[in-house]
Amino acid sequence: MLRWAEHKRWGLDVGASGVAVVIEDDDDIREVVHAVLEASGLEVYAAGNGVDGVDAVRLHNPDVITLDLGLPDIDGIEVTRRVREFSDAYIVMLTARAREVDTLQGLAVGADDFVTKPFRPRELLARVETLLRRPRGSTLLNGSGGTTTAELPPAGGALSLNAPTASPVKASGQAAEPSGLEHNGLYLDVATRTTRVGTEEVQLTRTEFDLLQALMEAGRVVRSTTGLARWLHAREYETGGYVSESEERAIQVHIANLRRKLGDSAQSPRWVETVRGVGYRLAAKSSEN
């Protein structure tokens, strides 16, 4: 357990809650990650290999998982595949900088975020706490001065009346609760965290759901790739802050996963349209809807 002095030295913000599973074969790193997360208020369980890690996730039903990609039995990518069969816990991959291809593969099979080694404890904890603050309100502001792109403001911001949005879902001739959004037959309910295409429910990871919600609330207003990356990492005010190429590619991978699960096409999009060199927005409203 970390002493209070270590909280101050590392800049840790005590107050997280929930359950975490640490999957890491290096004893020293596993102990550090375990101590950092436990000191933040999480109930932490640890495993030294992939198979035991999957079992620990099944047993403890965590809110967040930290996962080393280079495990001695099955690698982190396979662990992610197996975990995603039964858990929607947030997955943060711990990866060496030279293994970016593996990192993108991990995101492609369902991981939510990554931290490169060597990392500072406060960096890891900041990523974990950002994930655990979701789901949160992601109402969006339109860009000032009539611009066609806009950054994502913090939770609780007001939705611009000038920004086109997806239509609230209606039932029995009455307006639905604000949590319901619909666009071209795609239905998203923020309150229940569910997504449907027509009558068919679509299983999304939490990050995929959050990105879809951001796009549906923004309507035809373009959301830049860097803006989406800042929003996912709770850096909304850092409009001039640096976003790495890896973070931008991570957004692109999440969007590709989202399209695949929705059965959408990048070439002829029904829901998620790419604005080349900028970011993403909702496709135009279909005349059939």
Image (tube, helix red, strand yellow):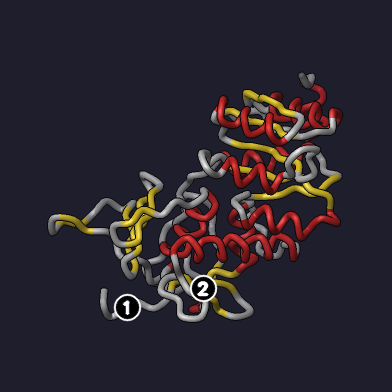
Furthest-front residue in this view: 73
Q: Which mark is residue 194?
A: none
- Give the class, few, some or many, for how many residues have Cα within 10 Å of label 2's Cα (few <14, many ≥20): many
The earlier-in-sequence mark between 1 and 2 is: 2
Where is 227 relative to 63, above or below?
A: below
- Measured from the top left, where is residue 180 in percent x and y? 32, 54
| Residue located beneath label 2 in the image | 222
- Measured from the top left, where is residue 81 in percent x and y? 61, 47
Q: Residue at x 56, y 30 (%)?
A: 58
- Under tag 1, what secondary structure? loop
- Give the class, few, some or many, for how many residues have Cα within 10 Å of label 1's Cα (few <14, many ≥20): few
| 168 sits left or right of 61 in the view | left
Mark 1 or 2: in front is 1
- Measured from the top left, where is residue 116 in percent x and y? 80, 49
Q: Residue at x 79, y 48 (%)?
A: 95
Q: What residue type is labelled 2?
A: Val
Specify the quadrant of the image occupied by residue 118: top right
- Asked whether the residues under the numbered discs 1 and 2 touch, taking CB atoms below 8 Å apart as contact, a structural biologist would say no
- Measured from the top left, where is residue 45 in percent x and y? 67, 24
- Under tag 2, what secondary structure? strand
Q: Residue at x 45, y 49 (%)?
A: 137
Q: Residue 286 carries which label?
A: 1
Closest to the observer: 258 or 38? Answer: 258
